[in-house]
C-alpha cells in the first residue's frame, strides 16, 4: 500500500469514533463487530424458532388455531393476513401486532 493511502486511513481512524483499527481498504470494508447488528436468519431457523413460539402466538391470538399458526411457519405476511381476516383489524394494525410479537418473541439479537 502506498504511504499516502496508509496516511489517509490512519487519518480516517483518528477522526472517527465508530471505525476502529483501519489500516487497509479490506479492514474498512469488513463489518463492525457490533453485538446489536441485525442478523438475518435462514428460513429453517425461523421455522424452528416459530415452532417454539406457537404457544405464545396462540395466547396472543386465541382466535387462530394452533394448526393455522404452525402452518404459517412464522411467515409474517401469512400471519398478518390471518389476523386481519379473523379479527377484522386494518392491515396496518395487523402488521403492527405481528411486528410487536416478533420483536418480543422472535428476536435474533444475541
Image: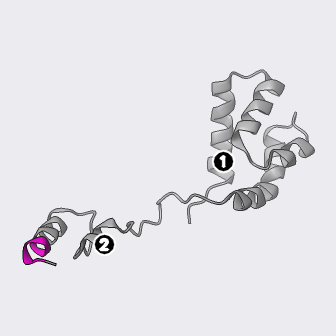
Residue at numbered disc 1: 102
The 10 Å Cα crowd at callout 2, few under 14, some 14 to 19, many 20 or more, is: few
Residue at 60% x, 59% y is 108
Residue at 16% x, 65% y is 12
Q: Are marks 1 and 2 in contact (CB under 8 Å)?
A: no
Instruction: Using the image as rendered, state which of residue 30 and residue 37 is in the foreground.
Output: 30
Circle nearer the N terminus (1, 2): 2
Mark 1 secondary-structure assignment = helix
- Where does the image place residue 27, in percent across and percent down from the top left? 30, 73
Residue at 76% x, 31% y is 81
- In terms of secondary structure, what is the magenta stretch mainly? helix
In the image: residue 35, left or right of residue 41? left
Residue at numbered disc 2: 26
Give, as a single range, the part of the protein colored magenta.
Answer: 2-7
Q: CA distance from mark 1 to mark 2?
A: 35 Å
- Where does the image place residue 53, in percent across and percent down from the top left? 78, 54
Quarter holding the C terminus is bottom right
Residue at 16% x, 70% y is 9
In the image: residue 14, left or right of residue 52? left
Q: Is residue 96 above or below residue 11?
A: above
Quarter holding the N terminus is bottom left
Amino acid at each position: 500500500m502506498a504511504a499516502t493511502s496508509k496516511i489517509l486511513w490512519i487519518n480516517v481512524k483518528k477522526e472517527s469514533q465508530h471505525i476502529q483499527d483501519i489500516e487497509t481498504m479490506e479492514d474498512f470494508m469488513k463489518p463492525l463487530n457490533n453485538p446489536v447488528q441485525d442478523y438475518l436468519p435462514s428460513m429453517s431457523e425461523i421455522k424452528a424458532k416459530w415452532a417454539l413460539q406457537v404457544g405464545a402466538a396462540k395466547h396472543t391470538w386465541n382466535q387462530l388455531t394452533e394448526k393455522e399458526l404452525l402452518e404459517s411457519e412464522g411467515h409474517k405476511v401469512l400471519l398478518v393476513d390471518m389476523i386481519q381476516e379473523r379479527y377484522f383489524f386494518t392491515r396496518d394494525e395487523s402488521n403492527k401486532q405481528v411486528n410487536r410479537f416478533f420483536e418480543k418473541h422472535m428476536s435474533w439479537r444475541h
